[in-house]
Image: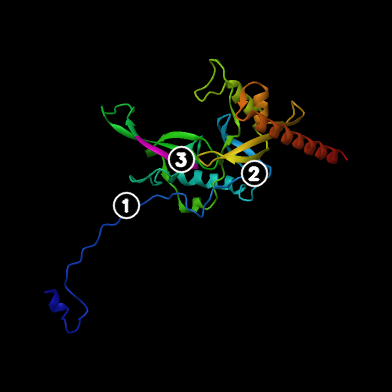
Amino acid sequence: MIREKFPQRRFSSMTLEQVFFLPLPLPTFPVIPDSLQLLQLVEGVSNDVILSAMVSPSHFFLQQPTHPTYPTLAKLDMWMSVCYQDADAPSLPENVQPGSICAAPTMGGWYRAQLVAIEEVPSEAEGAEEGELVKMCDIRFVDYGGYERLPAESLRQIKTDFMALPFQACECYLASVVPAPSSDENKTADGWSMQAYSLVEDLTQAQVIQAQVVGHAADGLPLVFLYTYSHSFGQVVHVNQELVRQGLAVWAVPEVVGEQAEETASEENEQAADEAEAKAA
């Protein structure tokens, strides 16, 4: 009947063979493209940074407030909060994989995050059936740092428009120091004392500090020396060295690192003194 309507002499290129279409693949989720790199600290110089999140005294995230893209972050936060207030914002697809970028809610806003791990665990929700599983995601906030575990259902797909800004938080380790041996009951699971947490917070919070990259860990993250001007001490303080001086840490390579720390701290103090004299003049 179809051939009668489309005679072969007039429609010679048309066949009546049955065509099978392959099913469309499930939608994939954006991962970090090669062109969108995380902002890296510059080696060989002192980088102006803000310690934006601390996992432990030796594991933290640094932002670069003097980088030309940094002022755009506040606008991104605002637009993401407006966008994801909409209850119709699409949830994560079922086939989402670790490494994918998503939008995650925390502290009253929505922020870019990377999926680190996905795990199905027994549901603790009221009224959940025995054996019912819920998908939980470990995420890393790529602009402010820090980790959090959230239900997959609370996360949302990231809009392409929100992927233009380079990720602002650089994950780092404090170079060449390890927790000091102690039987202190107040020590955390990572071996650091609460005094070490408090000291690093007091020296770095709410101010621009300096970070120098001195190497890289086995996982590729930068190892850094941190320097800050302390009004309590009245001079530039080498954070790594101050942890050691107060007995909260020990040098991993005592002789070499200790000498380098002293030399660098001395140079920083001389520079700070010169700047103070110049301002006074």
Which element is circle 1 on?
loop
Residue 115: say if magenta: yes
Amino acid beneath label 1: Leu
Residue 232's quadrant in the figure? top right
Residue 104 has which mark? 3
Is 221 placed left or right of 210 in the picture? Answer: left
Find out whether the residues at labels 1 and 2 contact each other: C-beta distance under 8 Å: no
Amino acid beneath label 2: Pro
Q: Is residue 171 above or below residue 76?
A: above
Q: Residue furthest front?
A: 255
Q: Which residue is mark 1?
A: 26
Q: Which residue is mark 2?
A: 65
Magenta residues, start to end: 111-119
Give how far across and how far down residue 10 sits, in percent. 19, 84
User: Is label 1 or label 3 in front?
Assistant: 1
Q: What residue is shown at x 50% (from left), y 40% (from top)? A: 219
Name the residue nearer the viewer: 34 or 151.
34
Q: What residue is shown at x 69% (from left), y 33% (from top)? A: 261
User: Which quadrant: the N terminus?
Assistant: bottom left
Give how far across and how far down residue 100 sits, in percent. 42, 46
User: 10 Å neighbourhood of mark 1: few (<14), some, or many (≥20)?
Assistant: few
Find out whether the residues at labels 1 and 3 contact each other: C-beta distance under 8 Å: no
Magenta segment main secondary structure: strand
Q: Residue furthest left?
A: 1
Lower sequence index among marks 1 and 3:
1
Residue 229's quadrant in the figure? top right
Is 123 placed left or right of 236 in the picture? Answer: left
